[in-house]
């Protein structure tokens, strides 16, 4: 049975800090649901009802397109070691691009990661926990470096071109946030 909370408790914040992976989910009004795994120490709790993650350049930019259209977002954490817990954060997401007035302040909360393109912020409406008894146990070995190495190899001009070529429209044809 899920347990709902109005905000992140100290214990839930500690749980988030212990996780190496989280999953985001967004969907347009009509079109494909997007679920995406994230990691590389890119998640931050801003306060009890606001979280953010540093979004890296990737194959698409579905999250931005969906948030521009309707703002709906869920972020999920699962424990893969220790006590089985699933934590879901429900709310309204927004994207902060490098030309946004809040970029410098928010970006300073993260370790610089090559390929960073935007920050996704979630204003939490509600959150819930459930048991997670069906989630398997896994040992964390380390972060993969393939995406970081790819970004370094592309360089700033190459990343800019890649984003222009691949990240300005979602797979459903929706526009994404301007990427600068």
Image (spheres, helix red, strand yellow):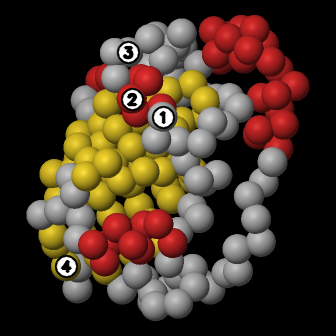
Tell me residue 23's x, y (percent): 49, 56
Q: Quadrant of the N terminus?
A: bottom left
Left or right: residue 114 compared with residue 175: right
Q: Secondary structure at mark 1?
A: loop
* Residue pointed to by mark 4: 3
Q: Secondary structure at mark 2?
A: helix
Task: Give the CA distance from mark 1 to mark 4.
Answer: 33 Å
Q: Nearer the viewer, mark 1 or mark 3?
A: 1
Q: Residue at x 82, y 20 (%)?
A: 154
Q: Quadrant of the C terminus?
A: top right
Q: Earlier in the sequence, mark 3 or mark 2?
A: 3
Q: Secondary structure at mark 3?
A: loop
Task: Give the CA distance from mark 3 to mark 2.
Answer: 10 Å
Tell me residue 176's x, y (percent): 45, 18
Frontmost residue, 90 versus 145? 145
Q: Nearer the viewer, mark 1 or mark 4?
A: 1
Check disc 4: other Cα within 10 Å, few if <14, some if 14-19, many if 20+.
few
* Residue pointed to by mark 2: 105
Tell me residue 58's x, y (percent): 66, 32
* Residue pointed to by mark 1: 108
Frontmost residue, 74 versus 179? 179
Q: Earlier in the sequence, mark 3 or mark 4?
A: 4
């Amino acid at each position: 049975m899920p347990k709902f909370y109005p905000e992140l408790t100290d214990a839930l914040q500690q749980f988030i800090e212990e996780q190496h992976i989280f999953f985001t989910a967004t969907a347009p009004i009509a079109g494909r649901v997007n679920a995406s795994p994230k990691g590389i120490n890119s998640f931050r709790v801003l306060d009890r009802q606001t979280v953010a993650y540093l979004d890296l350049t990737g194959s698409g930019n579905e999250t931005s397109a969906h948030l521009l259209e309707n703002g709906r977002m869920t972020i999920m954490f699962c424990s893969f070691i220790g006590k089985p817990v699933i934590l879901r954060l429900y709310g309204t997401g927004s994207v902060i691009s490098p030309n946004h007035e809040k970029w410098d302040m928010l970006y300073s909360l993260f370790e610089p990661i090559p390929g960073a393109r935007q920050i996704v912020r979630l204003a939490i409406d509600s959150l819930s926990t459930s048991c997670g008894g069906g989630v398997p146990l896994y040992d964390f070995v380390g972060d993969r470096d393939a995406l970081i190495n790819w970004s370094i190899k592309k360089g700033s001009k190459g990343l800019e071109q890649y984003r222009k070529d691949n990240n300005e429209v979602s797979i459903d044809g929706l526009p994404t946030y301007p990427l600068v």
